[in-house]
């Protein structure tokens, strides 16, 4: 009988182990495998509790309850193992915990039980299996018997976790790569669809156009038509007589020799037959050298603007010649005001405007192109300033009906000095006013221009390391008032002193001292209107004294007098 009972027990135990082994791997899901394995244990080993805590690293990771039976009393999730319990699991690996054991209470809290014994397995530091039974104690034989299949179960669960995490990482990486590809393709598609230049893909092997953007359709005027042949969009020959195919072949050769892109001017043909000039760029596909990306920039509008600019420059040159004729012959300066404000300034504004439009239309520009454009704009702006100064000069000469009034020169000069305060303070200039009359006859506007020009010049034409010292004085003569503006500036050489009152006479470059060479000519014109003379005494490098006279008994330029006092 004993032998038969023992045999039966062995067979029964083997049956349990076999059934447990079969329950491992029933699913690719961790929880489902735990449920299957623990159900077999519960039913075949007469257990009152079975639970599995996943813990990949007992020292560093928080244990997670994957599944427990009876399930209704437990919530899967993270739990806490005390440091002492962790040390115990690492040391013992497999243990029976019964009354009097150091960790009995700890396990009772984990399993929500109060009586009975516990069988605890550390499955290769990857998880903890706790079994509980009230009816009978666990034996060492039973513990050892289950050890192998429990270890196999733990390793399988660990492999599932690794697989799941690897799959999650692969899926995440795939999602990131997919999102990045979508983002990149979306950017390219937007650029492709919304650029103002025609863009198309060309297969050099099949010689077919296989894809193009909306701008291509507009520039080549396709309408509802489609094109696939390259011959449909280019004429047979280029301007030099070379065939279009041979012309393109020259640049294709450079691509085959390693260049990434080639750019050249090229005649293209619209669907309606119109030939137009373009700036064409060919780019090779890094993945397939036979696939080319071609960008066509229509230069039609640019050439129109260049033509209009050239016409404006011709008009400006013609007006400049006309202006030079007026200056050289000193004829009809009264008509210059109208010409300067209309005939001359209008083409200048056109030149500046079209040059700036040209600059915007061909961005990015080469350094040489930018230099040419800036030269045109600067030259035109300089001409504008010259015309404005001439306009002021012509008005001084033309307005002969300006009234003469009584005015206070001393107050006028003090006002001018206060208006020049910023410039005076910047140069730390010293200005002295002495003996100026308080009651003379003259035109206040003209004399204000006269004094302001001469005082400004005295402040301007001085060495940078010299503190300007300017004295403004006057003396009464029998029929005139004589005024002096003395400075310690750069002075003027004797050979130039007779020329400085001529129109457009400049002794220095604009980089040294700004101005158009009209100021002193205007001063002379104002002095002459006041029936006086203007002159200079100067020593080069030491300073100058400008002097001028004003008639005492001065009549209006039109012949009338007035008693009105100004300033």
Image (spheres, helix red, strand yellow):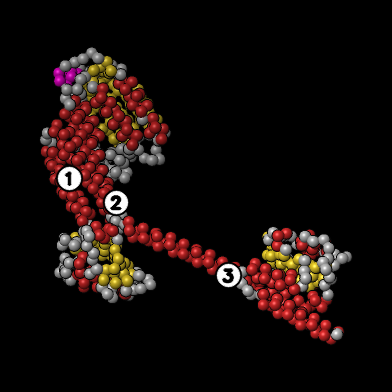
Answer with mark 3 or mark 1, whichever residue precedes in sequence. Answer: 3
| Residue on which the image places disc 2 | 360
Mark 1 or 2, which is nearer the eye? 2
Residue 145, position in %: x, y?
Answer: 77, 78
Residue 392, by quadrant, is top left
Residue 219, by quadrant, is bottom left
| Residue on which the image places disc 1 | 316
State if disc 2 and disc 3 touch (CB < 8 Å). Answer: no
Image position of 427 with respect to 400: above or below:
below
In the foreground, 452 or 117: 117
In the foreground, 26 or 348: 26
Q: What residue span does the magenta drawing correspond to? A: 554-559
Answer with mark 1 or mark 2, whichever residue precedes in sequence. Answer: 1
Residue 217 shows in this picture: yes
Image position of 261 with respect to 368: above or below:
below
| Residue on which the image places disc 3 | 166
Residue 244, position in %: x, y?
Answer: 20, 70
Compute the Cα span from label 1 to label 2: 23 Å
């Amino acid at each position: 009988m004993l032998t038969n009972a023992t045999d039966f027990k062995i067979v029964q135990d083997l049956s349990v182990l076999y059934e447990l082994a079969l329950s491992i791997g029933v699913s690719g899901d961790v929880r489902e495998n735990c449920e299957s394995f623990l159900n077999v244990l519960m039913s075949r080993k007469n257990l009152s509790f079975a639970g599995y805590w996943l813990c990949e690293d007992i020292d560093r990771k928080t244990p997670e309850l994957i599944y427990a039976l009876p399930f209704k009393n437990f919530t899967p999730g993270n739990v806490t193992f005390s440091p002492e319990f962790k040390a115990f699991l690492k040391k013992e690996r497999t243990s029976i915990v019964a009354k009097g054991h150091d960790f009995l209470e700890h396990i009772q809290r984990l399993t929500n039980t109060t009586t009975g014994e516990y069988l605890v397995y550390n499955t290769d530091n990857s998880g903890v299996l706790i079994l509980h039974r009230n009816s009978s104690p666990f034996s060492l034989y039973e513990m050892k018997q289950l050890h192998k299949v429990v270890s196999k179960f733990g390793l399988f669960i660990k492999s599932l976790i690794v697989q799941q995490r690897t799959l999650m990482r692969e899926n995440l990486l795939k999602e990131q790569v997919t999102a990045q590809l979508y983002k990149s393709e979306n950017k390219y598609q937007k650029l492709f669809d919304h650029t103002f230049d025609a863009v198309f893909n060309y297969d050099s092997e099949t010689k077919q156009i296989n894809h193009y953007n909306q701008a291509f359709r507009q520039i080549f005027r396709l309408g509802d038509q489609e094109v696939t042949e390259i011959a449909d969009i280019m004429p047979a020959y280029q301007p030099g007589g070379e065939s279009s195919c041979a012309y393109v072949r020259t640049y294709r050769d450079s691509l085959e020799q390693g260049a990434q892109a080639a750019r050249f001017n090229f005649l293209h043909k619209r669907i309606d037959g119109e030939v137009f000039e373009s700036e064409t760029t060919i780019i090779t596909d890094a993945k397939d050298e036979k696939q080319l990306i071609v960008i066509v920039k229509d230069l039609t509008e640019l050439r129109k603007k260049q033509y209009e600019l050239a016409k404006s420059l011709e008009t400006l040159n013609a007006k400049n010649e006309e202006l030079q004729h007026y200056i050289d012959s000193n004829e009809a300066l009264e008509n210059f005001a109208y010409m300067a404000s209309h005939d001359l300034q209008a083409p200048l504004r056109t030149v500046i405007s079209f040059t700036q439009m040209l600059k915007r239309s061909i961005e990015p520009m080469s350094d040489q192109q930018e230099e040419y454009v800036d030269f045109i704009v600067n030259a035109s702006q300089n001409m504008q300033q010259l015309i404005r100064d001439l306009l002021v000069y012509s008005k001084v000469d033309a307005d002969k009906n300006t009234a003469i009034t009584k005015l206070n020169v001393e107050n006028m000069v003090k006002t001018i000095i206060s208006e020049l305060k910023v410039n005076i303070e910047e140069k730390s200039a010293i200005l002295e006013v002495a003996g100026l009359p308080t009651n003379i006859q003259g035109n206040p506007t003209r004399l204000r221009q006269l004094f302001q020009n001469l005082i400004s010049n005295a402040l301007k034409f001085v060495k940078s390391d010299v503190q300007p010292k300017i004295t403004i004085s006057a003396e009464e003569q029998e029929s005139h008032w004589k005024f002096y503006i003395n400075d310690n500036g750069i002075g003027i050489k004797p050979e130039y002193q007779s020329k400085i009152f001529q129109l457009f006479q400049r002794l220095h470059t604009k980089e040294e001292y700004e101005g158009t060479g009209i100021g002193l000519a205007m001063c002379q014109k104002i002095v002459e209107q006041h029936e006086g003379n203007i002159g200079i005494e100067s020593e080069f490098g030491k300073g100058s004294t400008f002097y001028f006279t004003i008639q005492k008994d001065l009549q209006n330029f039109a012949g009338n007098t007035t008693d009105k006092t100004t300033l």
